[in-house]
Amino acid sequence: MYEIISKEMLTPTICRMVLSAPRCAKAAQPGQFLIVIVDEKGERIPLTVSDSDPEQGTIAIVTQGVGASTKKILSMEVGDSFADVVGPLGRESDFVHIPEEELKKLSYVFIAGGVGTAPVYPQAKWLHERGVHVEVIIGARNKDLLIYTEEMAKVCDRLHICTDDGSVGFHGVGTAMLEKLVSEGQHFDRAVAIGPMIMMKFSTLTCKKLGIPITVSLNTLMVDGTGMCGACRVSVGGKMKFACVDGPEFDGYLVDFDEAMRRLGQYKAEEAAVNQ
């Protein structure tokens, strides 16, 4: 059993939990994910690791209540336990394998949207701890939907907040902020975008225009998380890949986002029926 050590509602529908999972905490790398199961009849829910503490034996997950299973997670309290937590799964971020001296010469920019801000945190933290220049752009529709802003500010060189309605920070989307930074002379060697599929598509188009290589995380496509169900199939560079076992991170230039977005909506009717 995997006990909930702490719980914090980041917004009315987004929750951060810290779980006791010593083996997962010891092995987790930036970019990887977990499968959590609430009870013996529960659905397998893939969630990216938003932080880990090997010494304490804990991992942090962030869940948005959008369906029956995720709302059940949000109803759990400190002291409750998950029936199972499996992971870490998926491939770790590519930068983990870059020699540290070479890595320190690079400048990274992260573009985070919505709940995608949570998995950006451990990546920015990992790079920042190794002396890499990191800037993070967090975007949301309004200030009430922003998460991890204080935590993120501690693990990057500059944090840029964007809201669609201008309620706080830059009035506009994250890609507009990226273009603004580049126009002001800021140079970035690599970009990483994590968030809604449409946001990652336009982040990729913007980075391509600016000549910045970009990595995107297709974690939103995953269902089973082990490659067995085939629900997360996506075309990358003209080849069929599985987001869960070949990713979840891919070269954004090579991803067929239109196909991925069609794939993302394939179970909407079933999800609606379950949530009625």
Image (tube, grey):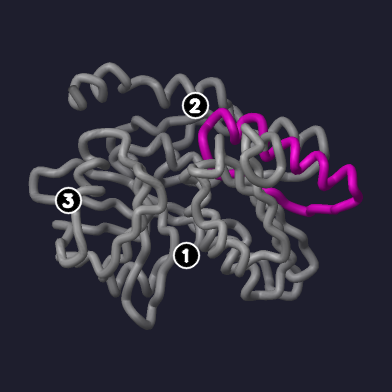
Q: Amino acid at mark 2?
A: Ala
- Distance of label 3 from label 2 (alpha carbons): 28 Å
| Residue marked by disc 3 | 38
Q: Amino acid at mark 3?
A: Val
274 over 254 or under it: above or below: above
- Distance of label 3 from label 1 (alpha carbons): 23 Å
Q: Quick one: 148 or 233, which is closer to the camera?
A: 148
Q: Quadrant of residue 113?
A: top right
Q: Is residue 192 visible?
A: no
Q: Quadrant of residue 176?
A: top right
Q: Earlier in the sequence, mark 2 or mark 1?
A: 1
Magenta segment: 174-203
225 over 52 or under it: above or below: above
Q: Earlier in the sequence, mark 3 or mark 1?
A: 1
Q: Residue at x 40, y 44 (%)?
A: 244
| Residue marked by disc 1 | 29
Q: Nearer the viewer, mark 3 or mark 2?
A: 3
Residue 21 location (% of width, % of height): 27, 69
45 on left or right of 258: left
| Residue marked by disc 2 | 260
Q: Earlier in the sequence, mark 3 or mark 2?
A: 3
* Mark 1 residue element: loop
47 over 88 or under it: above or below: above
Residue 104 location (% of width, % of height): 75, 71
**Circle 3/circle 1 CB separation < 8 Å:** no
Q: Residue furthest left?
A: 40
Q: Residues within 10 Å of mark 1 (few under 14, many from 20)?
A: many
Q: Is residue 148 visible?
A: yes
Q: Nearer the viewer, mark 3 or mark 1?
A: 3
Q: Quick one: 176 or 243, which is closer to the camera?
A: 176
Give the quadrant of the N terminus: bottom left
Residue 168 location (% of width, % of height): 64, 45
